[in-house]
Amino acid sequence: MKYEDILKDLKQKRYKPVYFLQGDEPYFIDKITDYIANNVLDESERDFNQTVLYGRDTSITDIINTAKRFPMMSEYQVVIVKEAQALSRNIESLGDYLKQVVPTTILVIDYKYKKLDGRKALAKALKKEGYLFTSDKIKDYKLPDWIIAYCKSQQLEITPKTAMKLGEYLGNDLNKIVNTIEKLKVVMSGETEITDTLIEKNVGISKEYNTFELNNALGNKDVYKANLIANHFGQNPKNYPLVVTLGVIYGYFTKLIKYHQYAGKMSDRDLAQKIGVHPFILKEYQKAARNYTMNKIARIFGYLRQYDLASKGVGNVSTTDGELLKELIYKILH
């Protein structure tokens, strides 16, 4: 089952008797569950026909017994099991219900942050019947496209570069991204474009001083800009912790070394997917690859390990994180 297909069917009142929602990304699981909870039954029907159970407070036997009840003065009853991952030790027992589902029951199982063992009977049965939905994290290189698409669904506009900055700053936590966009909508006063200025003012992502721009400066060997950003980070350590910055730089050069390995061997779109970046910025990696050989990148990984240890006090007594970052930037650029 795909998320879009599930919502389309639900909106057209084509219901399945079981929705087993599993995976690491809670956003899609919550959206499906909330839609079913708020739309399948009328408000007057919910008191008698909508039951919410919690994994820590129930059992598979209780879930099955509840699902086998018949609705009262309603076409359906809805049974929602939240935090069902707490039942992981006994979850296979749910297969007994699948052998004879009650067509007037819509059973929703929220199995967050876990996945069933695909080799076992329950997963096979759910998949065969079309009851299984897996909610995976959006890959980093797909995140800007997801943000752009979500904004479009809200009648908003955002450029690929701004979407990339937002995704890099917030990470691939979709609930966090959606909440941020919703907050921006409140202050936009009828405007439709989410700009860098709007984000800087209301989210705290500086247009000039952020890890996206730092990596860009390093890739272009822009000494002035890289040092300007490093100085800003050093003066604002709470907003730009060194451990996070080191991780972002490491990720950037990891992608760059992959570019060296695969460039010329596949299409640009496949190459972007292989190294884990949006096709929009692939040319930036092409430029950076001319500035950094494989041997130079290998040395940079050594510098990153060295300064990661120094930031944790290994061989370092008094040097501040800001000074460590400036030293690291100097070694990378020279």
Image (cartoon, rainbow, N blue to C red):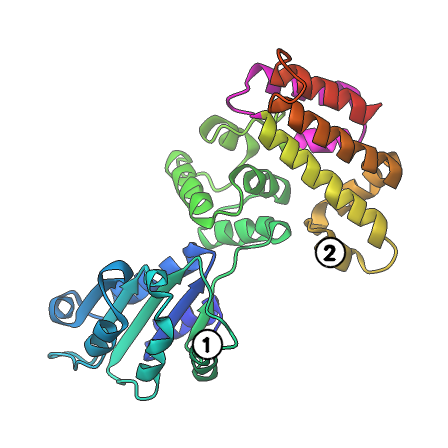
- Quadrant in which residue 129 is drawn: bottom left
- Which amino acid lies under the numbered mark 1 shown in the image of this protein? Ala
Q: Residue at x 71, y 47 (%)?
A: 280
The residue depicted at 53 percent of the width and 49 percent of the height is 147
Q: Residues within 10 Å of mark 1 (few under 14, many from 20)?
A: some
Q: Amino acid at mark 2?
A: Lys
Image quadrant in which you'd find residue 223: top right
Instruction: Quote the CA–CA distance across marks 1 and 2.
Output: 29 Å
- Above or below, comparing residue 68 to residue 35 in the picture: below
Q: Position of residue 99 (x, y in %)?
A: 34, 88
Query: Against 141, is 197 above or below?
Result: above
Q: In the figure, residue 221 lies in which quadrant?
A: top right
Q: Which mark is residue 274?
A: 2
Question: Are discs 1 and 2 less than 8 Å apart at CB?
Answer: no
Q: Position of residue 68 (x, y in %)?
A: 21, 81
Most prominent secondary structure in the magenta stretch? helix
Q: In the drawing, what numbered circle is on residue 73?
A: none
Q: Which residues are magenta?
A: 213-241
The correct choice, above or below, for 317 with respect to 102 in the image is above
- Would residue 192 appear left or right of 269 to someone viewing this image? left
Binning the other alpha carbons within 10 Å of mark 2 as few (below 14), some (14 to 19) or many (20 upward) gives some
Q: Which residue is mark 1?
A: 123
